[in-house]
Image (spheres, helix red, strand yellow):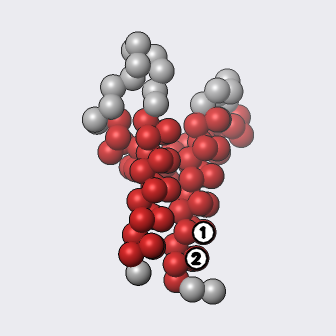
C-alpha cells in the first residue's frame, strides 16, 4: 500500500465523518445523538469553521459550507497526490 492510497483513504474517511456530522444535525438533539454529534463536532468543526468565515448561509438559513469543504478536501488531496 503506497502513501498516496493511505492519504486518499484518510481523506475519504474524514469526508464520511463530515457527512455523518451534517446528517445528524437533521435529527432532534438529545441522548446518544447529541453525544455522537458533539464528539464528531470536535473533529469536524475546526475544518468547517475555515469555510464558515468566508461563506455566509444562503438566505440566512441554508449552510453550504460542508459541501464546499468536502469538494475542497477531495479535489485538494487528489491534486496533491497526483503531483507525486
Name the side, left or right, on which 48 lies relative to 54: right
Residue at the disc numbered 1:
9
Percent across and percent down for residue 23 are 64, 35
Report how far apart the C-alphas of labels 2 and 1 lie in the structure: 6 Å
Q: Residue furthest bottom?
A: 1
Would you say the residues marked 2 and 1 are in contact, meaning their CB atoms lie under 8 Å apart?
yes
Kindly identify the residue that appears in the image at 48 percent across and 65 percent down. Answer: 78
Residue 35 quadrant: top right
Residue 39 in the image: x percent, y percent? 57, 49
The residue depicted at 44 percent of the width and 45 percent of the height is 69
Q: Position of residue 31 (x, y in %)?
A: 70, 34
Q: Is residue 8 above or below residue 59?
A: below
Residue beneath disc 2: 5
In the picture provided, is 32 more to the left or to the right than 13? right
Task: Please name whichever residue, 43 or 10, is drawn nearer the observer in this view of the structure.
Answer: 10
**Disc 2 crowd, CA 10 A, few/some/many (<14, 14-19, 20+):** few
Q: Residue at x 58, y 37 (%)?
A: 22
Amino acid at each position: 500500500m503506497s502513501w498516496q492510497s493511505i492519504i486518499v483513504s484518510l481523506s475519504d474517511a474524514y469526508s464520511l465523518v463530515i457527512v455523518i456530522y451534517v446528517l445528524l444535525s437533521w435529527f432532534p438533539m438529545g441522548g446518544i445523538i447529541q453525544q455522537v454529534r458533539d464528539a464528531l463536532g470536535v473533529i469536524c468543526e475546526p475544518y468547517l469553521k475555515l469555510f464558515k468565515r468566508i461563506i455566509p448561509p444562503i438566505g440566512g438559513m441554508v449552510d453550504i459550507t460542508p459541501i464546499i469543504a468536502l469538494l475542497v478536501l477531495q479535489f485538494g488531496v487528489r491534486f496533491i497526490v497526483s503531483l507525486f
